[in-house]
Image (cartoon, rainbow, N blue to C red):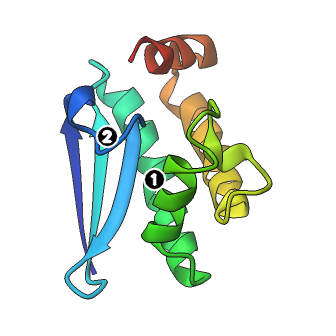
Amino acid sequence: MNIHIRTIPHREQRYPTVGDWWFEEFGQLLEIRVSDMGDWRKEALIAYHEFKEAVLCRARGITAAQVDAFDKGPGRNLDEPGESPLAPYHLEHMSAYASELGLMVELGVSFAEYSAAIEAL
C-alpha cells in the first residue's frame, strides 16, 4: 500500500472537515488530506488521526463511502460526526482520537491551542 498525505488550504477540502481520507487504485493508495493549520505538528496530529481511522475502517470493512455518507448526511450538523454512536466508524474514530491525544502530549501541543486552531478554520 502507498500513502499520500497532503496539506491543503482548508477551502479545498471536499466538505467541511480538517482531515479527510479515501482509498484509490483498487485499495492500494490511501489518500489523506489535511487542512493547512500553519503548524506542522497540528497537521501531523490530524494526519495521524486520519491514518489510524482509515486503516481501522479498512480492516473492519467500513468504506470511505460509508464514512462520507454519514459525515455529509446525518452527521453534517454535528461538531464531530465520528463521536456520534450512530456513525458507522464511531469506534474507529474514537480509537484514532485517543491516539491523537497521546501524540499531542508527545509533541508538546496544548489541547486548547489545538482546538482553537481547528475552530478557526
- Which amino acid type is shown beneath numbered disc 1? Glu
Mark 2 — residue? 34
Q: Looking at the rendering, in which quadrant would you find the N terminus? A: bottom left
Q: Residue at x 56, y 76 (%)?
A: 62
Q: Is residue 10 above or below residue 44?
A: above
Residue 43 pos. (x, y %) = 35, 33
Could you tell whether 35 is left or right of 84 in the image? left
Front-most of residues 79 and 4: 79
Local crowd size for mark 1, using a 10 Å CA cut-off: few (<14), some (14–19), many (≥20): many
Q: Looking at the rendering, in which quadrant would you find the C terminus? A: top left
Q: Which residue lies most toward the bottom here? A: 26
Residue 50: which disc? 1
Q: Earlier in the sequence, mark 2 or mark 1?
A: 2
Residue 73 pos. (x, y %) = 55, 50
Residue 107 pos. (x, y %) = 48, 30
Q: Is residue 56 above or below residue 114?
A: below
User: Is there CB contact under 8 Å for labels 2 and 1?
Assistant: yes
Q: Residue at x 56, y 82 (%)?
A: 59
Residue 63: which disc? none
Residue 7 pos. (x, y %) = 22, 38
Count the labels in the image: 2
Local crowd size for mark 2, using a 10 Å CA cut-off: few (<14), some (14–19), many (≥20): many
Helix, strand or loop under label 2: strand
Helix, strand or loop under label 1: helix
Could you tell whether 9 is left or right of 68 in the image? left
- Which amino acid type is shown beneath numbered disc 2? Val
Q: Is residue 37 above or below residue 6?
A: above
Front-most of residues 76 and 45: 76
Q: Which residue lies most toward the right here? A: 85
Q: Quadrant of residue 12?
A: top left
Could you tell whether 6 is left or right of 63 in the image? left
